[in-house]
Amino acid sequence: MVLILLILLRAIIGPTVIDRLISINAITSKVSVIILLMAFVRSEYGFIDIAFVFMLCGFVGSLWIVKVLTPGDWQLRIPGLKGFEGEKEEGISND
């Protein structure tokens, strides 16, 4: 809990948005570990599902924050593979 409070302090003081984002991810990870430890100690394994959902929500929230903070092109481009070029015109077919 002390580490979570220190990380929260870093999130408040953090000079950049990336510092705050990393702090939020660290807090999410530490809370998930606490939930998993509670599941182990109490032998109630239903808490494991709660921890996974909490981690997934933190991950999706982080992706959303990164997408909002980095406007621009979010197209997947893999140069050697056909079909992964992004929003280009359809290529000429070799029928």
Image (cartoon, grey):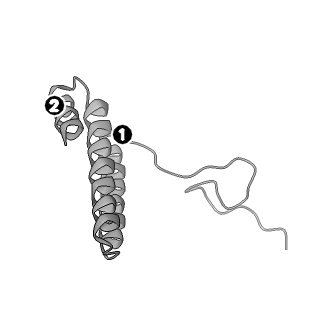
Gap in Å between the C-alphas at discs 2 and 1?
25 Å
* Residue lying at 32% horizontally and 45% vertically, measured from the top left: 25
Q: Is residue 51 above or below residue 22?
A: below
Toward which corner of the image does residue 32 lie, by quadrant?
bottom left
Q: Secondary structure at mark 1?
A: loop
Disc 2 or 1, which lies upstream in sequence?
2
Closer mark to the observer between disc 2 and disc 1: 2
* Residue lying at 16% horizontally and 25% vertically, measured from the top left: 13
Q: Is residue 17 above or below residue 51?
A: above
Q: Secondary structure at mark 2?
A: helix
Under mark 2, the amino acid is Leu
Toward which corner of the image does residue 3 lie, by quadrant?
top left
* Residue lying at 21% horizontally and 40% vertically, measured from the top left: 4
- For the C terminus, give its image quadrant: bottom right
Toward which corner of the image does residue 56 lie, by quadrant?
bottom left
Query: Which residue does the numbered mark 1 point to in the structure image?
Result: 70
Query: Which residue does the numbered mark 2 point to in the structure image?
Result: 9
